[in-house]
């Protein structure tokens, strides 16, 4: 039950029902495959020890989820930690936080109280917080009354870092709104997606057109055959909150451009009424223009470059310094594309137009808007007014939103970055980082010790260790035993690694919530949802729960619930003494104890 996200109950769980629900039907399937299982489950188990009632199942899940929470708490130990918080609506339109809280009031003070209650419940002290990671909502990042400011009042070292992935999202969304040609392009793209995907008949026509195109391309040798190649797909819709979905939408349009044109040709001739026909023809006319194809390929180039950064920021483990490095790399790639990529890009657009029979204008002619004629050529317009302008705006937004030089904490932290053979190393900045931002973690004597450690560190670690990221450096220091030599430096590295990069971890919890709380289970209680999500998200930890050792506290809890209370009494009285009469006493109490529980105790007794 802990390994599967299945519906525990059914509408009719009676013996005469043909569908008693996923859980019971799965139990029946396992019973049919194994005689030993069949003898101890469902109708063959004692009536008071079947453990299929909804209340008992929820209680078992709650006990197991609590055990997983304890395992997570044990991993944290007495170390410093950061908090990542994000909100999303579940299928029943209730606001959920990623720490598996249900909240109706999402003001900063209410969020702070709810989070504090969770920390207190798990014996985690606010004074140990060394980082906060949220999105850019006003109730989160507000400098005076935002959630981050409220925690800073309780712990002055709980530094807030605006989610890097959210910053990138805001950058590209801003470009789509404020650059007219980009906004116009995405408006046309939305219309294309709406027309093609508005009915199953049109989707079927798209698939047929793709199939015909693939067969033709294979016959003339323009495509290679192979496993997984030449798959028929659908036109992707751009999401409101995921910029990577915009990249997927643009990429899918380029990949099936010819097939989509075939669909529009059919619709323009056979649409049911004049209004729809006029709309289809207008979109098709725009789609077949050089300007649309030019911007389509430009956005594809830009978004493929930024999507690499987006995917990096979504990784499970990422340190703040590596994230800053990849932001810089992305800026450099865009700048190089702007300065050196025009000729190659223009040639790529021309080849695409030639292959799809799209007219390419004479680029040396004067550019016209309506009846007016500007004193500039068409090539100049596309090169400087579209190509350069779009890239310049995105670079400007990236420089503004990722301007870490104005955030002294992050700029000083780069002195620890081991990239390029420890090129950013600066002992003064490292000492200033510890002294100014972590005075509660380093005394004056320890700052002096750090200064002397850095002298040896420069001659030892920087000459002998080959690492490229701060995480690798920390691992190498621990594995080589140098962490016990460079104690102060290791402590500072741990503090910097605690700083959050993005809220991708919390967003994965929301993705899991869609699998657990579905439309068919939209009335799940919040506590039950929290237990199911805990076991589903932390399934790697749940697999290590010891289900066979009866001395384990978890199993004593499991055996104590409901009808198993008498079994626990027998075990507690006799187990420690290893009474040889245990099997006999269990047999005498068979009417009160399930066979599966007896089998577990036999196994423990025999071992």
Image (cartoon, grey):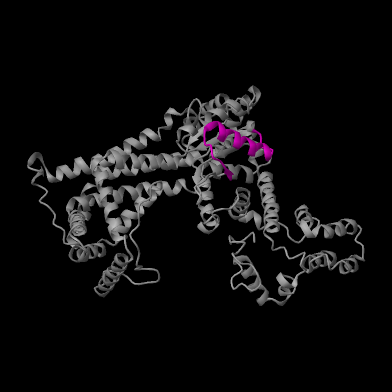
Inspect this view and state whether residue 91 appears.
Answer: yes
In the picture, which quadrant includes the N terminus? bottom right
Name the spot of residue 440 as percent of width and height, x first.
63, 26
Please say whether residue 121 is one of the residues in the magenta stretch. yes
Name the spot of residue 556 as percent of width and height, x first.
79, 55
Please say whether residue 607 is one of the residues in the magenta stretch. no
Identify the residue at the far top of this view: 444
Identify which residue is drawn at 75% across, 70% down: 45
Left or right: 588 in relation to 375: right
Q: Which residues are magenta?
A: 99-125
Quick one: 121 or 577, which is closer to the camera?
A: 121
Left or right: 73 in relation to 175: right
Quick one: 330 or 555, which is closer to the camera?
A: 555
Q: Is residue 306 above or below residue 19?
A: above
Quick one: 547 or 5, which is closer to the camera?
A: 5
Inspect this view and state whether residue 421 appears.
Answer: no
Name the spot of residue 450 as percent of width and height, x first.
61, 29
Identify which residue is drawn at 65% across, 55% down: 542
Name the spot of residue 10 as percent of width and height, x first.
60, 64
């Amino acid at each position: 039950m802990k390994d599967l996200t299945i519906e525990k109950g059914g509408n009719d769980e009676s013996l005469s029902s043909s569908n008693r629900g996923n859980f019971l039907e799965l139990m029946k399937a396992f019973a049919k495959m194994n005689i030993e299982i069949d003898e101890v489950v469902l109708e063959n188990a004692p009536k008071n020890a079947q453990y299929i009632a909804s209340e008992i199942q929820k209680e078992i899940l709650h006990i197991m989820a609590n055990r997983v929470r304890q395992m997570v708490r044990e991993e944290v130990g007495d170390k410093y930690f950061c908090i990542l918080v994000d909100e999303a609506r579940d299928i029943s339109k209730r606001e959920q936080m990623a720490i598996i809280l249900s909240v109706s009031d999402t003001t900063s003070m209410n969020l702070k109280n709810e989070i504090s209650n969770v920390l207190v419940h798990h014996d985690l002290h606010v004074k140990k917080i060394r980082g906060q990671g949220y999105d850019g909502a006003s109730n989160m990042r507000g400098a005076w009354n935002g959630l981050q400011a409220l925690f800073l009042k309780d712990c002055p070292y709980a530094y807030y870092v605006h989610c890097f992935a959210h910053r990138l999202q805001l950058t590209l969304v801003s470009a789509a709104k404020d650059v007219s040609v980009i906004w116009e392009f995405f408006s046309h793209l939305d219309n294309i997606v709406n027309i093609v995907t508005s009915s199953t008949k049109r989707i079927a026509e798209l698939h047929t057109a793709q199939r015909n195109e693939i067969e033709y391309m294979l016959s003339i040798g323009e495509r290679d055959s192979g496993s997984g190649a030449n798959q028929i797909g659908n036109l992707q819709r751009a999401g409101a909150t995921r910029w990577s979905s915009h990249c997927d939408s643009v990429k899918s349009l380029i990949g099936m451009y010819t097939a989509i044109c075939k669909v529009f040709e059919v619709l323009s001739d056979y649409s049911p009424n004049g209004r729809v026909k006029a709309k289809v023809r207008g979109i098709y006319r725009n789609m077949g223009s050089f300007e649309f194809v030019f911007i389509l390929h430009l956005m594809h180039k830009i978004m493929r470059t930024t999507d690499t950064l987006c995917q990096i920021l979504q990784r499970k483990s990422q340190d703040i310094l590596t994230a800053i490095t990849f932001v810089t790399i992305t800026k450099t790639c865009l700048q190089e594309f702007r300065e050196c990529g025009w000729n190659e890009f223009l040639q790529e657009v021309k080849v695409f137009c030639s292959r799809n029979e799209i007219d390419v204008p004479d680029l040396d002619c004067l550019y016209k808007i309506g009846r007016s004629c500007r004193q500039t050529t068409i090539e100049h317009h596309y090169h400087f007014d579209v190509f350069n302008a779009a890239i310049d705006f995105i670079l400007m937004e990236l420089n503004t939103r990722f301007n870490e030089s104005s955030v002294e904490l992050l700029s000083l932290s780069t002195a620890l970055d081991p990239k390029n053979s420890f090129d950013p190393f600066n002992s003064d900045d490292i000492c200033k980082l510890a002294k100014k931002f972590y005075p509660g973690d380093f005394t004056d004597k320890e700052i002096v010790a750090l200064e002397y450690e850095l002298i040896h560190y420069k001659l030892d670690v920087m000459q002998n260790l080959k690492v490229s990221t701060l995480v690798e450096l920390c691992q190498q220091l621990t594995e080589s035993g140098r962490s016990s030599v460079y104690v102060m430096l290791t402590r500072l590295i741990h503090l910097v690694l605690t700083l959050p990069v993005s809220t991708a971890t919390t967003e994965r919890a929301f993705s899991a919530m869609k699998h657990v709380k579905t439309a068919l289970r939209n009335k799940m209680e919040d506590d039950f949802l929290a237990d199911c999500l805990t076991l589903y998200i932390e399934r790697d930890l749940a697999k290590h729960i010891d289900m066979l050792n009866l001395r384990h506290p978890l199993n004593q809890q499991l055996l104590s619930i409901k009808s198993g209370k008498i079994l626990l009494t027998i075990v507690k009285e006799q187990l420690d003494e290893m009474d040889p009469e245990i099997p006999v006493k269990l047999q005498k109490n068979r009417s009160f104890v399930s066979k599966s529980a007896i089998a577990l105790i036999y196994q423990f007794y025999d071992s």
